[in-house]
Amino acid sequence: MASKIKVDQIQTGDGTGTIALQNQLSGMTSASMPTGSVIQVVSADIGALTTSSSQSFVDTNASIAITPQFASSKILATFTFAIAVWGQARARGGYQLLRGSTVISGGATEVIQIREVSGSSQEVTLPVSLSYLDSPNSTSATTYKVQIVATSSGGNVQMVGQGNTRPGNMILMEIAG
């Protein structure tokens, strides 16, 4: 038999008042959620791998959109994937996170060095967990995506996604501001 606790009021700790409980949660909407509450979650797996030898950033299959319910909301963007670098001696690669076409983490002047390799036939694969708390100040559909770059001539970089040996995923959470 399941137990239930039924009360109409709770007395405050110092005994100076009571807290009425009747219908406190009925009719609760996302607009009435307190700051820090999760309003919605959008998630997806990262598609097939993306490979590049370009020394300019290129789009990957790691792209996901959310439509915030409130302009005051924050978006917690989390991307988990693996990235591989190979090629000539000291090949390097990097990645960056964008909201639409705006770089919000990493970038051309802040390329995140993954790892150097010594020797033309070596490959280094590393797991990446990227999280960023953003304030898009919008209620329009907002896309977050990851781009990759080979930061040295003769190098290759690859984002490993779903269906490969190191699957990846993307999660966007709207948080009440």
Image (tube, helix red, strand yellow):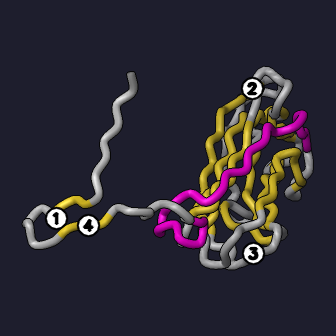
Quarter residue 106 falls in? bottom right
Task: Indicate which disc, 1 or 3, sits on the residue closer to the N terminus.
Answer: 1
The answer to whether 87 appears left or right of 125 in the picture is right
Q: Amino acid at mark 1?
A: Thr
Q: Which residues are magenta?
A: 29-52
Q: Position of residue 71 (x, y in %)?
A: 67, 78
Q: Which mark is residue 19?
A: 4
Q: Which residue is mark 1?
A: 12
C-alpha distance separating marks 2 and 4: 52 Å
* In this view, 38 is above or below 35: above
* Label 2 element class: loop
Q: Out of 146 and 33, give the one closest to the viewer.
A: 33
Q: Amino acid at mark 4?
A: Ile
Secondary structure under tag 3 reads: loop
Question: Is disc 1 in contact with disc 3, using a CB cutoff of under 8 Å?
Answer: no
Left or right side of 150 for 52? right
Q: Which residue is labeled 3 in the image?
A: 139
Q: CA distance from mark 1 to mark 2?
A: 52 Å
- As drawn, 80 above or below 119: below
Q: Which numbered tag is attached to residue 166?
A: 2
Question: Which badge, 1 or 2, is on the more N-terminal residue?
Answer: 1
Q: Residue at 62% x, 42% y: name it.
A: 129
In this rendering, the answer to whether 95 lies above or below 135 is above
